[in-house]
Image: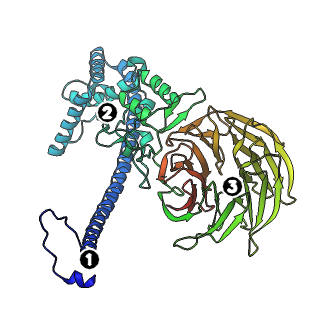
């Protein structure tokens, strides 16, 4: 064969098919591979360039937002000054002569009719005069007679022009215009408050068709303004609004004091404040929403842990060295302290092979792991021995455990059962202490207050309930129109975040009727966890998203889109790592970047 290949190729006869030798085919494949490799490198460079440009654009968004917010504050100050000047004018006018009174009143009335174009022209002329002549401003003489319409009339007009326009806006009784609270929303159409762009992070575009925004939004698309929100449905789908948002937006738009830009703001905002009477308003985020200590900038993926089955439960140790992933029939233990590819260092066979682990909790000392799932038995593992072993089992009448919580003193374990009961276990004596009965369907999620006095549970019966652990009774009940899949109690108190089957995240105040409603997930919210500092929390969903939110108003800090549904999550005690469990049969470890 080799000898034949050394001969010169036989000329191709007419009608004969063209054939390559093996070596020629290999050469062609090699050339094509090199071409594809070069193309890949050029595309990679282009991608990196686009990523850096995207980061720069996001920085610009933040800068523009801060400028806009500063101008808004300045406008509020000017409106207050206007009110005071109006009051002063009203007090001074009666002391003037009749002639001067008429002149001043006419000037004020004229000022109220000044349009923005005229005002801008006046300001522009003054700036030009100032630049060309460096002339000082028109002095106001201490005596009222100085307010004549002679040589000083242009100064008075400039003063009352600003005065009149702002007073015109501030005077609701006179012409039904916007008060400062409405000004806050409707005078910032390009960068509305609820669109504060989060800092650069892991994101993908939102599914809103291009070109569907009004001209006054300028070149900045909603996707950029809203943090480039992700949609698992692709990039061409229409934006769908929940019935309550549609109804609220409709009512909002009927108000005579709301501009069209405010209506667009309302529709495309993702964070809403819901008052006690059910009124929804877009949330104007404060300027420090994404700034300050303990607020992350973004998160980066550092490990992918191939569990081999759908990961329904994850937890990370206090030392942040070990991660525990619960799948079908077992929990796997991973050492994440070193970089590089990972394989489990241990496997704990907890349930029958076909039953899923639904929750696992590790005690702060790192020596004990409690595991629950699709079985009537909880298993308690001793991790201090060279080979982890079961040291106790806790059996209840319920066929499954959906969630676990541990008391702050590590003496008591709470189990959310599929029959709706909350079972309380004494970990030291391994005995059942009591049961909280109330949920009429499975109890799906649970968290406990830092002082260990209150327990919060969510259920498939569409309720969230608060229990007094000292008196053993139910304190509160919140009813929803959707099943509750996840919840978390803020470590610093006051706020409870709830993840819904309806895709909403609701942040409830524990003692007031106010709450925030957040709309970034596009499918059910499967898990939720607060950072230990209490300033932010994460939620994950069937839409493949990991969202990080600012407590309590829900400014989007960062967002990551995974390859499958994200079923579970945990945050390390030092707030430096996030772990997620996926339907893609793996867990992902993120490093939180500050």
Label 3: few (<14), some (14–19) or many (≥20) C-alpha neighbours in 10 Å: few
Residue at the location (51% across, 52% down)?
564
Separation of marks 1 and 2 at Cα, in angstroms: 61 Å
The quarter of the displayed image where residue 578 is located: bottom right
Separation of marks 3 and 2 at Cα, in angstroms: 54 Å
Nearest the viewer among 295 and 50 is 50
In this view, 70 is above or below 162: below
Residue 290 visible in the shown view = no
The percent position of residue 107, horizontal first and vertical second, equals: 27, 21
Residue at the location (79% across, 46% down)?
398
Q: Dot 2 lies on which element?
A: loop
Residue at the location (75% across, 48% down)?
400
Q: First in sequence: mark 3 or mark 2? A: 2
Q: Dot 1 lies on which element?
A: helix
The percent position of residue 43, horizontal first and vertical second, equals: 29, 62
Colour convention of the picture: rainbow
Q: Which residue is mark 1?
A: 23
The percent position of residue 507, horizontal first and vertical second, equals: 59, 41
Q: Which residue is mark 2?
A: 214
Residue 585 visible in the shown view = yes
Tell me the mark number nearer the camera, choosing from 3 and 1. Answer: 1
Nearest the viewer among 547 and 142 is 547
Nearest the viewer among 79 and 564 is 564
The quarter of the displayed image where residue 317 is located: bottom right
Tell me the mark number nearer the camera, choosing from 1 and 2. Answer: 1
The quarter of the displayed image where residue 200 is located: bottom left
Q: First in sequence: mark 3 or mark 1? A: 1
Q: Which residue is mark 3?
A: 354
């Amino acid at each position: 064969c080799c000898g034949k290949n050394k001969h010169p190729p036989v000329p191709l006869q007419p009608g004969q098919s063209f054939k390559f030798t093996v070596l020629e085919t290999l050469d062609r494949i090699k050339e094509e591979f090199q071409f594809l490799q070069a193309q890949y490198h050029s595309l990679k460079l282009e991608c990196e360039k686009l990523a850096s440009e995207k980061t720069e654009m996001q920085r610009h968004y933040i800068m523009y937002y801060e400028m806009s917010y500063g101008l808004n504050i300045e406008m509020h100050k000017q409106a207050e000054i206007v009110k005071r000047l109006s009051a002063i004018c009203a007090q001074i006018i009666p002391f003037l002569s009749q002639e001067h009174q008429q002149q001043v009143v006419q000037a004020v009335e004229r000022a109220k009719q000044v349009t923005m174009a005229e005002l801008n022209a006046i300001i522009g002329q003054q700036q030009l005069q100032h630049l060309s002549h460096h002339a000082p401003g028109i002095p106001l003489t201490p005596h009222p007679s100085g307010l004549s319409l002679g040589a000083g009339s242009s100064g008075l007009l400039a003063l009352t022009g600003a005065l009149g326009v702002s007073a015109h806006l501030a005077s609701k009784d006179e012409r039904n215009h916007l008060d400062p609270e409405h000004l806050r929303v409707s005078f910032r159409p390009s960068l509305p408050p609820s669109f504060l762009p989060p800092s650069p992070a892991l994101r993908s575009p939102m599914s809103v068709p291009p070109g569907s925004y009004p001209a006054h939004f300028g070149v900045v698309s909603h996707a950029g303004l809203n943090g480039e929100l992700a949609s698992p449905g692709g990039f061409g789908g229409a934006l769908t609004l929940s019935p309550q948002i549609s109804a609220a937006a409709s009512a909002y738009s009927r108000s005579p004091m709301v501009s069209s830009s405010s209506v667009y703001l309302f529709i495309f905002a993702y964070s809403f404040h819901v008052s006690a009477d059910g009124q929804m308003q877009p949330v104007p985020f404060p300027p420090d929403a994404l700034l300050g200590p303990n607020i992350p900038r973004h998160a980066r993926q550092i490990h992918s842990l191939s569990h081999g089955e759908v990961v329904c439960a994850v937890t990370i140790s206090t030392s942040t060295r070990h991660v525990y992933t619960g799948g079908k029939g077992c929990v796997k233990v991973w050492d994440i302290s070193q970089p590089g590819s990972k394989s489990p260092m241990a496997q704990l066979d907890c349930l029958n092979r076909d039953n899923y682990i639904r929750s696992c909790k590790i005690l702060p000392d790192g020596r004990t792991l409690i595991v629950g799932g699709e079985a009537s038995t909880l298993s308690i593992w001793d991790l201090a021995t060279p080979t982890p072993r079961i040291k106790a089992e806790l059996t209840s009448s319920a066929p499954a455990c959906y969630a676990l919580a541990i008391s702050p003193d590590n003496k008591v374990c709470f189990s959310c059962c599929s029959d709706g009961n909350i079972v309380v276990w004494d970990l030291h004596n391994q005995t059942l202490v009591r049961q909280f009965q109330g949920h009429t369907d499975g109890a799906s999620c649970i968290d406990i207050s830092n002082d260990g006095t209150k327990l919060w549970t969510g259920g498939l019966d569409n309720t969230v309930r608060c229990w007094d652990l000292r008196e053993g009774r139910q304190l509160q009940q919140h009813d929803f129109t959707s099943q509750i899949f996840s919840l978390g109690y803020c470590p610093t108190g006051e706020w409870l975040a709830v993840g819904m089957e309806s895709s909403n995240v609701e942040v409830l105040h524990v003692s007031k009727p106010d709450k925030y409603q957040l709309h970034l997930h596009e499918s059910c919210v499967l898990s939720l966890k607060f950072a230990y500092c209490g300033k932010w929390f994460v939620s994950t969903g069937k839409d493949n998203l990991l969202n990080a939110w600012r407590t309590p108003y829900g400014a989007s800090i960062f967002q990551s889109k995974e390859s499958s549904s994200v079923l579970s999550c945990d945050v390390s005690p030092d707030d430096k790592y996030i772990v997620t469990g996926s339907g893609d049969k793996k867990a992902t470890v993120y490093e939180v970047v500050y």
